[in-house]
Amino acid sequence: MTPIALLLLYVAFRVKQFACDFLFQTDWMALTKGMPGREGWTALFTHAAFHAAGTTLIMLIFSPGLWWLGLLDFGIHGLIDRIKGLYTYRRGWTAKDTLFWWTLGLDQEAHNFTHLSYILIVVVAAGGIISAA
């Protein structure tokens, strides 16, 4: 994998994260995925499915043999969001609370580190980083 391909892969994951967590996530998903019960799980499942599709698409472009990272992302993204959602919901935190924003920041960084681990898997599968020169 060349340094340019590595940079493009990183940017692809950042764009996917922004798109799925902020552009494509509906109010229903964002406000419901941390609630207990069927509706909370349904919202979480739907949201995590968007992320899984995005990761699968990225893998099909950069490393088709690693398509299964989309399935892994479904589980990991869902777990991170469920923990954050339940924690925020149980404490009644809203956008008016500082701890709500801290928790959102931790959530985003957890996803960023997850994507970094996927990138490392791609680099290892590609045989490492090869100089562009």
Image (cartoon, rainbow, N blue to C red):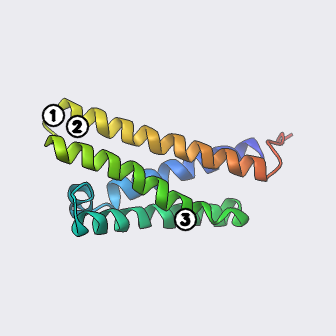
Quarter occupied by residue 56: bottom right
Q: Are marks 2 and 1 in contact (CB under 8 Å)?
A: yes
Q: Residue at x 29, y 32 (%)?
A: 102
Q: Using residue 68 as the reference point, say whether residue 122 is left or right of it.
A: right
Residues at circles 3 and 2 in contact by the CB criterion of under 8 Å: no
Q: Position of residue 113 (x, y in %)?
A: 53, 40
Residue corresponding to mark 2: 100
- Residue 7 placed where, x, y %? 64, 43
Label for residue 51?
none
Give the alpha-carbon distance from disc 3 to disc 2, as whole Å. Answer: 28 Å
Q: Which residue is mark 3?
A: 71
Nearer to us in this view, 79 or 59: 79
Q: Which residue is mark 1?
A: 97
Is disc 1 surrounded by few (<14), some (14 to 19) or many (20+) residues within 10 Å?
A: few
Quick check: can you spot residue 70?
A: yes
Callout 3 amino acid: Leu
Q: Earlier in the sequence, mark 1 or mark 3?
A: 3
| Real-space Cα separation, disc 1 to disc 3, in angstroms | 33 Å
Answer yes or no: is residue 19 visible.
no
Q: Secondary structure at mark 2?
A: helix
Quarter of the rendering containing residue 66: bottom right
Give the amino acid at mark 2: Phe
Q: Secondary structure at mark 3?
A: helix
